[in-house]
Amino acid sequence: MQITFDQVSHIYAKGTPFERVALHNISLTIPSGSFVGIIGHTGSGKSTLIQHLNGLLMPSSGQITLGDAVITPKRRLPHAQRRDIGLVFQYPEHQLFEETVAKDVAFGPLNFDLPTEMVEARVKESLEIVGLDYATIKDRSPFHLSGGQMRRVALAGVLAMQPKVLVLDEPTAGLDPAGRVTILEGIYRIHREQNLTTLLVTHSMEEAARYADYLLVMAQGQVAMQGKPEEVFMQVDRLRELSLDVPETVALVSQMNHLLPDKASLPSSLYREEELIAHLLERLSVPKEG
Ligand SMILES: Nc1ncnc2c1ncn2[C@@H]1O[C@H](COP(=O)(O)OP(=O)(O)OP(=O)(O)O)[C@@H](O)[C@H]1O
């Protein structure tokens, strides 16, 4: 589903002493099927931006187009279309509330009046997508699971709605490295298999480099940079001005290019670890394993 922001601003607590312009005249287009990484310093407006996508926040001015639906300061996203947008909040496990995992995952689809047999099939499928075994976990209390498992149950609850757009606000925050990989690899697989449009807010440049095909860099309520990852990561100085790091691979390529003669320099498109290794092996004429 294509998403367009047209001169969108958002002002919190307008007309009060606490007024705060969190988004300022944002215009952007996210083509259907993209995996967009949204990065930016704390307070730059990332969460505010994505909360406009499922009607949690309304624009103060401008308009947002989600497929055929248009959201304006006066027009909300119609209820029927809200289920197309799956929003996974920061620490989504805080919203688990049912007595069993199966009931929790089923809550959204039941709320949209889907027939019970269909809901059951969706619950099973969604739990399996996030790597949890339906039979062993369905009757357990979500509150007796590990942090990583709770997070996966919460994500399954969103997937059970079969959204067309998946919006994730730091889905791996607070998880250990193995938990991060499980969640993100699962998300990436569903993104490709179901041809979703995915927006991932992350503080991790490594995650952005690994999964996103397009990046939005937010700063002070505006889109400060945007483009393909290699285009954004090439601008190391600009990113540092915005107090953002670059992925380790980009830093390494940049350091090596300072040391290598011009004619041997490495292309800046090598921002993913595997691609850098493959490139170096090829230069060294070492055959790849496997
Ligand atoms: N409910 C609110 N009321 C008033 N101001 C708010 C509210 N929510 C956010 N803000 C302000 O709006 C600005 C943008 O906040 P937002 O949460 O969108 O940033 P963010 O980039 O998502 O930050 P983080 O990375 O810390 O989650 C900040 O200055 C923040 O203080």
Image (cartoon, rainbow, N blue to C red):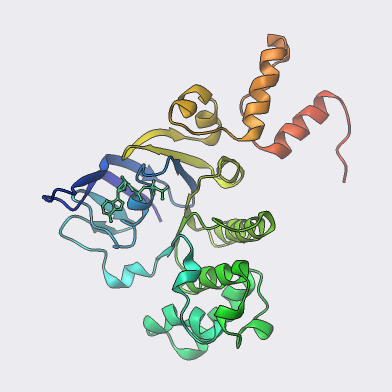
Residue 17 visible? The answer is yes
At x 88% / y 30%, what residue is drawn?
Answer: 286
Residue 109 in the image: state x and y as whole percent.
Answer: 43, 80
At x 32% / y 48%, what residue is drawn?
Answer: 4
At x 54% / y 33%, what residue is drawn?
Answer: 245
**Front-most of residues 39 and 199:** 39
Residue 116 in the image: state x and y as whole percent.
Answer: 47, 90
Residue 8 visible? The answer is no
At x 65% / y 74%, what residue is drawn?
Answer: 132
Residue 139 in the image: state x and y as whole percent.
Answer: 60, 88
Count of marks overlaid on the render: 0
As drawn, the residue found furthest toward the left would be 15
Q: Is residue 2 above or below residue 283?
A: below
Q: Does 245 sit left or right of 4 as displayed?
A: right
Q: Does 44 sit left or right of 243 as displayed?
A: left
Q: Is residue 178 above or below residue 141?
A: above
Quarter of the image with the N terminus in it: bottom left
Residue 136 in the image: state x and y as whole percent.
Answer: 68, 84
As drawn, the residue found furthest toward the front would be 17
Q: Is residue 44 above or below residue 158?
A: above
